[in-house]
Image (spheres, rainbow, N blue to C red):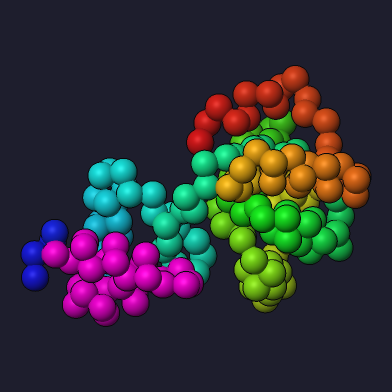
Amino acid sequence: MTGQQRRKIIIEAIQNSDEPLSGMALGQLTGVSRQVVVQDIAILRAKKYHIISTNRGYLFSDGHKFTRLFKVHHTNEQTEDELKTIVDLGGTVVDVTINHRVYGKMTARLNIRSRRDIKDFLNDIKNGKSTPLMNITSGYHFHKVCADSEAVLNDIEVALKGKKYLAEVMPYEENLSDNE
């Protein structure tokens, strides 16, 4: 099988999967190592395929055309409610970013689009004996959220504001959305 044929199989497998596919699973499917799959993913990204990596594997980023960055603030205990608020209204939480005055900007991909994804994320935090990234900045963080329309993003903003999760963007944070 040529590299081109292998990458076509990888694209089709990711497109047809309801869950992220690990590099190991894609390697087994195509008869190559995980390292070769990682190289293939890099080639596909260079060809403008919007493949993202999560801690559970590879998937295509949603075809959502509308994106908004929300600065939020809440406790660890409110994380589940915040995420449910977003996904229940039709949003996908693409990532989480903190802007630390000393350490700088740190971003982690989430790609949370369902209550099941929320459950998996919270279990990963718990089982990894970790704490959410927002704890470094006393609960302040940003979420890039995408949706199918501006109206959905407006509804999410209203709901987050109603729950008092929205926080004021500081002047030194205004360029945060400039870097993808």
1 left or right of 176 in image: left
Q: Quadrant of the N terminus?
A: bottom left
Residue 121 visible to the viewer: no
Q: Which of these two is toward me, 180 or 60?
A: 60
Q: Which of these two is toward me, 166 or 151?
A: 151
Where is 120 relative to 70, above or below? below
Asked where in the image residue 86 lies, by quadrant, the reply is: bottom right
> How far across and how far down the image is residue 65, in percent?
52, 41
Within the magenta stretch, is there residue 31? yes
Where is 11 relative to 176, above or below? below
> How far across and how far down the image is residue 170, in percent?
78, 25
> How far across and how far down the image is residue 142, in percent?
70, 42
Q: In percent of the image, x 26 and y 78: which residue is there?
A: 29
Asked where in the image residue 141 lies, by quadrant, the reply is: top right
Residue 60 visible to the viewer: yes
Outermost left residue: 2
Q: In percent of the image, x 24 and y 58: which residue is there?
A: 40
Span highlighted in magenta in the image: 5-33
How many marks the image carries: the answer is 0
Within the magenta stretch, is there residue 168? no
Q: Which of these two is toward me, 156 or 83?
A: 156
67 left or right of 2 in image: right
**SS majority, magenta:** helix
Q: In percent of the image, x 61 and y 48: which residue is there?
A: 147
